[in-house]
């Protein structure tokens, strides 16, 4: 069972806006920044959002992140078929002294 | 841009050990601002951080409590790589294993291609 809690699945139609939630605790999200990773089928995770709401170079501005208290969210606007992937949230946990992850949310573009 | 290339066995027998290696290009295993992690992924457990090593005037090694007694992460400065050894494996250790680099911002931002390790007799 993962330390951070994500819904197992989400879906949307092309052009729609979808959000994925990530819930943690005072020792992880409550104290440290949140990262989001996109994992396309059969590939390694790729950094999508860092420091709660920053996008690495090359990531479209359709992807955005936010954090409030011990929860975080990833929003994808203008949904495209190539966004169909699994999305994972991650944060450093000061109590466990290690990285913790969410269980992953599989996004389906209908 | 950091690139990580993994190598190691795909099939291991229960109670045995295995080692995986991660070769680094575009950075140094001895960098004072990087850290080098091992993470595994299985359908039942999702992404699970196993541990990391990094150099800050001396070498540090940090392990997840769940596997601390069975794993060792080691840097190899001569080959600019780092390794993971897992001992006394069981079928629960069956997973895709990734090495991952943590950069200047303290964020995991580079990943190896992954190696599927299956524990089976």
Image (cartoon, rainbow, N blue to C red):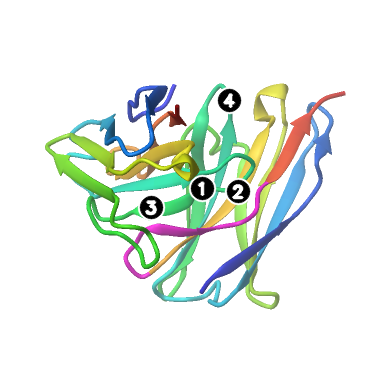
Q: Which residue is mark 2?
A: B98
Q: Chain of mark 2?
A: B
Q: Marks 2/3: CA distance?
A: 17 Å
Q: Main secondary structure of the magenta part?
A: loop
Which image quadrant is residue A97 in?
A: top left
Q: Against A81, is A109 above or below?
A: above
Which residues are drawn in magenta?
Answer: B104-114
Labels 1 and 4 within one chain:
no
Chain letter for mark 3: A
Numbered label attached to residue B43? 4
Tag 2 or tag 4, which sits nearer the N-term? 4
Whether pointer 1 and pointer 4 mark residues with C-beta atoms closer than 8 Å, the reply is no
Rounded to the nearest whole Å, what is the CA distance between mark 1 and mark 2? 9 Å
In percent of the image, x 40 and y 65: which residue is there? A58
In what quadrant of the picture does the C terminus of chain B appear?
Answer: top right
Structural crowding at the residue carrying mark 1, measured as other residues with C-alpha within 10 Å and reported as few (<14), some (14–19) or many (≥20): many
- Do the CB atoms of the residues marked 1 and 2 lie less than 8 Å apart? yes
Distance from the alpha carbon under mark 1 to that under mark 4: 15 Å
Residues at circles 2 and 3 in contact by the CB criterion of under 8 Å: no
Counting from the top left corner in percent of width and height, residue B108 is at 42, 56
Question: Which residue, given by chain and number where applicable, does mark 3 sit on?
Answer: A48
Q: Horizontal and vertical percent for residue B54?
A: 47, 64
In the image, B106: left or right of A65?
A: right
Q: Which mark is residue A45?
A: 1
């Amino acid at each position: 069972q993962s330390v951070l809690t994500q819904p197992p699945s989400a879906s949307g139609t092309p052009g729609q806006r979808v959000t994925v939630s990530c819930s943690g605790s005072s020792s992880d999200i409550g104290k440290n920044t949140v990262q989001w990773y996109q994992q396309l089928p059969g590939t390694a995770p790729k950094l999508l959002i860092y420091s709660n709401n920053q996008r690495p170079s090359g990531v479209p501005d359709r992807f955005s992140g936010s954090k409030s208290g011990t929860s975080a969210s990833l929003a994808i606007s203008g949904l495209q078929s190539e966004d169909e992937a699994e999305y994972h949230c991650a944060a450093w946990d000061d109590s466990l002294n290690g990285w913790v992850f969410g269980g992953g949310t599989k996004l389906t573009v209908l | 841009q950091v690139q990580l290339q993994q190598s190691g066995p795909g099939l291991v027998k229960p109670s045995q050990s295995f080692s995986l290696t991660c070769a680094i290009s575009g950075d140094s295993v001895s960098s004072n601002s990087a850290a080098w992690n091992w993470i595994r992924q299985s359908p039942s457990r999702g992404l699970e951080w196993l541990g990391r090593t990094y150099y800050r005037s001396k070498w540090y090694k940090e392990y997840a409590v769940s596997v601390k007694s069975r794993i060792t992460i080691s840097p190899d400065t001569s080959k600019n790589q780092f390794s993971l050894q897992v001992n006394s494996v069981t079928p629960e250790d069956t997973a895709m294993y990734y090495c991952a680099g943590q950069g200047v911002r303290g964020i995991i931002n580079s990943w190896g291609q992954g190696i599927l390790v299956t524990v089976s007799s």
